[in-house]
Amino acid sequence: PLAGCWAIALNLDNGEPLWTLEVAEGYTPLNWRCNIHGFYVDGDYAYGGLAQSGNHPNNSNIIGRMFKIDISLKEPEVVKIWYPFDPELTNTYDAPSWSYLGAGSYNFPAIIEDYLVFGTGQIYRTPK
């Protein structure tokens, strides 16, 4: 089975895939329960959010993030990732108590002038 989280673009006329992109790679503890939420397209870029699928502290083993995909390329790619926390303080599957968990990006992002605006879900754990 496929692992990770994927973005896909479909042809509006026939539903055929135009491209697919793995935005959270592989079956790893950091992204095996991820969901992609709400894309916003602005010119050559698509912005999308990632959250964990369990929506419960016992199922949460990732942190949310927002990513920017360059869709102008023949093979689109993630060109930027924003985390709600310092990535050095984020989690792993067996995360120590000093790491963050949660804060999924469940909403559609917005672009307001030079700002990418998005919210996050609940934070399940903060550093002690």
Image (cartoon, rainbow, N blue to C red):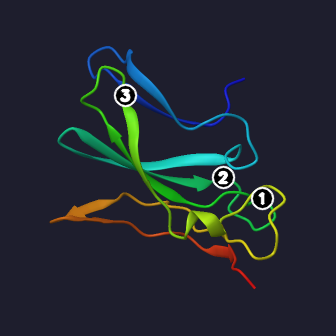
- Which residue appears at 68% of the width and 32% of the height? 3
Residue for badge 3: 9
Residue for badge 2: 53
In x, y percent, where is residue 98? 76, 76
CA gap, disc 2 and disc 3? 21 Å
Image quadrant for the N terminus?
top right
User: Does dot 2 land on a helix, a strand or a loop?
Assistant: loop
In x, y percent, where is residue 69? 36, 40
* Amino acid type, mark 1: Asn
Residue for badge 1: 59
- With respect to residue 105, does 30 lie above or below? above
In x, y percent, where is residue 28? 74, 41
- With respect to residue 51, does 86 lie above or below? below
Mark 2–mark 1 contact, CB under 8 Å? yes
User: Does dot 1 land on a helix, a strand or a loop?
Assistant: loop
Image quadrant for the C terminus?
bottom right
